[in-house]
Image (tube, helix red, strand yellow):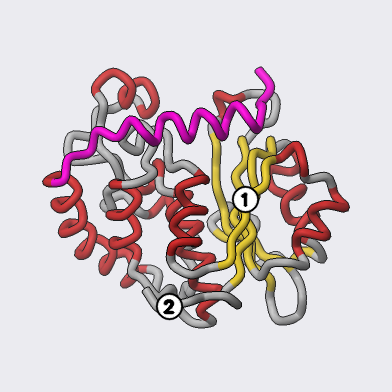
């Protein structure tokens, strides 16, 4: 089955309203993640960006829904779903803020997870986080941000869009012809030399510079990705520190 960007974005928005994460569970996850995040940083101390989502097996994001969770992940996850499985959108926000801050993100990753568990986690995080929620968070916290759907973004439009913003959040199906291959969201940043870099896209892409935003997007999954949405983010109008 082929992907459809508008249907996918609507599904994200609709399921984000179905949040079954209690306030108590949200707070417990935050306390747990403060320790788990410190442990992750110890083993990835040379990384400025989050590049190894698969190693976040002890960081929690979202809660299990018995039948759905087992169908998606083939296990129940009693304590919570590991961020390794479903937190790519939140990671992309962290990485974009890190790029715009020129050093490190102005908010710790556990705090971001806590926020999106409350506002944006789709079906309690079982299918990730709504791109619209990422957009609203960035705008609310003073960033200049805009979301565009795939249908409006051909190569020329992407090139124009890339000149208007400093960093980007790219959401795509891993296979444009098969929705069962699931969605992944990555950050794309622009280096001082003008090249574009993908973050948390897989070890094969780490440190690889592309001459344009469109080339970076097209190179993901060797051209097999199904473009869903792109968020442009700039820090020029940032009103406050988080």
| Residue beneath disc 2 | 240
Q: Say which of 222 and 8 sits in front.
A: 8
Question: Looking at the picture, how far across and down is residue 230, in whole percent?
Answer: 65, 50
Question: Going by the image, does 89 lie left or right of 109?
Answer: right
Q: Is residue 104 above or below residue 55?
A: below
Q: Is residue 84 above or below residue 10?
A: below
Which residue is at a point 62% across and 56% down the rendered structure image?
146
Q: Say which of 113 and 37 sits in front.
A: 113
Residue, far right: 156
Sequence-wise, the earlier of marks 2 and 1 is 1
Q: Is residue 27 above or below residue 124?
A: below
How many circles with numbers are drawn on the protein? 2
Q: Is residue 177 above or below residue 117?
A: above
Question: Looking at the picture, how far across and down is residue 26, in whole percent?
Answer: 20, 48
Q: Which residues, given as a range, are shown in magenta?
A: 1-23
Mark 2 closeness class: few <14, some 14–19, many ≥20 residues within 10 Å: few
Q: Quadrant of residue 91?
A: bottom left
14 is within the stretch colored magenta = yes
| Residue beneath disc 1 | 147
């Amino acid at each position: 089955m082929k992907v459809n960007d508008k249907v996918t974005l609507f599904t994200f928005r609709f399921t984000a309203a179905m949040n079954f994460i209690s306030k108590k569970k949200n707070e417990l996850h935050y306390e747990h993640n403060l320790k788990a995040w410190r442990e992750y940083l110890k083993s990835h101390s040379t990384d400025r960006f989050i590049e190894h989502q698969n190693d976040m097996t002890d960081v929690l994001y979202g809660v299990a829904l018995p039948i759905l969770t087992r169908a998606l992940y083939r296990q129940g996850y009693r304590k919570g779903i590991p961020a390794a499985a479903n937190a790519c959108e939140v990671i992309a926000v962290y990485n974009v803020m890190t790029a715009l801050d020129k050093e490190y993100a102005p908010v710790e990753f556990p705090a971001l997870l806590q926020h999106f568990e409350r506002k944006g986690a789709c079906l309690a995080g079982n299918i990730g986080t709504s791109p619209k929620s990422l957009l609203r968070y960035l705008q609310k916290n003073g960033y200049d941000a805009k979301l565009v759907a795939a249908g409006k973004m051909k190569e020329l439009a992407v090139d124009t869009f890339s000149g208007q913003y400093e960093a980007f959040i790219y959401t795509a199906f891993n296979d444009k012809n098969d929705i069962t291959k699931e969605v992944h969201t990555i950050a794309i940043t622009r280096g001082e030399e003008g090249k574009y870099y993908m973050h948390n896209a897989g070890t094969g892409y780490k440190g690889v510079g592309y001459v344009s935003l469109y080339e970076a997007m097209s190179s993901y999954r060797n051209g097999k990705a199904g473009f869903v949405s792109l968020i442009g983010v700039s820090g020029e109008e940032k009103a406050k520190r988080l």
